[in-house]
Image (spheres, coloured by chain):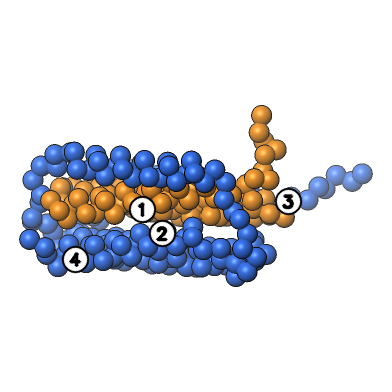
Amino acid sequence: MELLITALIIAAVLFGIGLYGALSQTNLVMIMMGIELMLGASMINLVAFWRYLHPEAFSIQMFVLIAMTVMALEGAVGFAIATQRFRTSGSVEMEESAELKG
Amino acid sequence: MISVQLILLIIFGLAAIWFGWRVFMTSSMVRSALSLLGSMVAIGILFIIMEAEFLGVLQIMMMGTEMSIMAIFMMMYMMDPGGLGQMDMYHQKNISIAAGVIVTVLIVGAAFATDWGTIATQFPGPHEQNRLLGMEILKRSMMIFETAGVTILTGMIASIAVALSIKNSVEK
C-alpha cells in the first residue's frame, strides 16, 4: 500500500507545481511547461494504478500512451502559436495578448 | 517493511519534484527547459521502477527529444536565454501558490482517504507486458489508437498552418 500512496503523493506534488506554473507564468512556453508537468503527474498516477491495483488491465497503459500523445500535440500546437505570436508581435508574453479579450 | 522499490521510488520521486520546482525558480529559459527534461526523465525512471519498462523507455526517449526542441525554441523567442536580465515573468503569484497548495493537499487527502483494496503482487514480466499491450492496442483499443494517430496528423497540419507566414497577396 505504501508504494501506491508514495507514487500518488509524488504525482500530487508534481501536479501542484505544474498548476502553480501554468497559472503564474506570463510566458507562453513556460505555461506549456506547467501543463506538461501536470500531464506527467497524471501519467505517474495511471502507471501506479496499473502496477499496484490492476496489472491485468492494459487499457490503463493505453491511457498513458494517449497522455503522451496529448503532451506531444500540446507541444507542437503550442510552439506553432508561439511562432506566429512572435512573428506578429515580437514576443510570447501572454500579458500582451489581450486583443481577443471581450 | 521498506523495500528497495520504495526507496528508489522516493529518491527518483524527489528528483522529479526538485527538477519540476527548478523549472519555475530559474530566470534562465534554457535552464528551465533542461530542468523540465530532468523532471521528465525522472518520471520515466519512476515508470521503470514501477515495472512498466516499455512506457518508461518511451517516456525518456520522447521527452528527451521534446525538451531539447523546447530549449532551442526558448533561445529563439527570448532575447535573454541566459537569464542575465533577471526578468520578472510572474503574475497573480499568491493566487497561483494558493491554488497549487490547495490542489496538492486535496489530492493527497483523497489518496489517504480512499480504500484502495488489495495491492496486486502478481504482474506480467516485460516481455509478456509488451505482448499484452500490443494485443490491447490491436484488439479492444484499436479505434482509440487509430484516433490518436489521426489526431497527431491533424495536429501536425494545424501546427504548420498556424506557424505559416501569411503574406497579403492583394495588390494595393
Distance, label 3 to label 4, CA atoms, is 49 Å
Q: Which residue carries the number 2 mark?
A: B20
Chain A palette colour: orange
Which disc number belongs to residue A14?
A: 1
Q: Eyeballing the image, is B101 above or below B36?
A: above
Distance, label 1 to label 2, CA atoms, is 7 Å
Asked if the residue at tag 4 contacts the one at tag 3, i.e. Cβ–Cβ closer than 8 Å, the answer is: no
Say yes or no: labels 4 and 2 on the same chain.
yes
Q: Which residue carries the number 3 mark?
A: A89
Asked if the residue at tag 1 contacts the one at tag 4, i.e. Cβ–Cβ closer than 8 Å, the answer is: no
Say yes or no: labels 1 and 2 on the same chain.
no
Q: Which chain is blue?
A: B
Distance, label 4 to label 2, CA atoms, is 20 Å
Residue shown at 60%/67% (left/top)?
B83
Q: Quadrant of residue B99?
A: top left
Q: Earlier in the sequence, mark 4 or mark 2?
A: 4
Task: Describe the element under mark 1 as helix, strand or loop.
Answer: helix
Kindly tell me whether residue B57 is visible in this rendering: yes
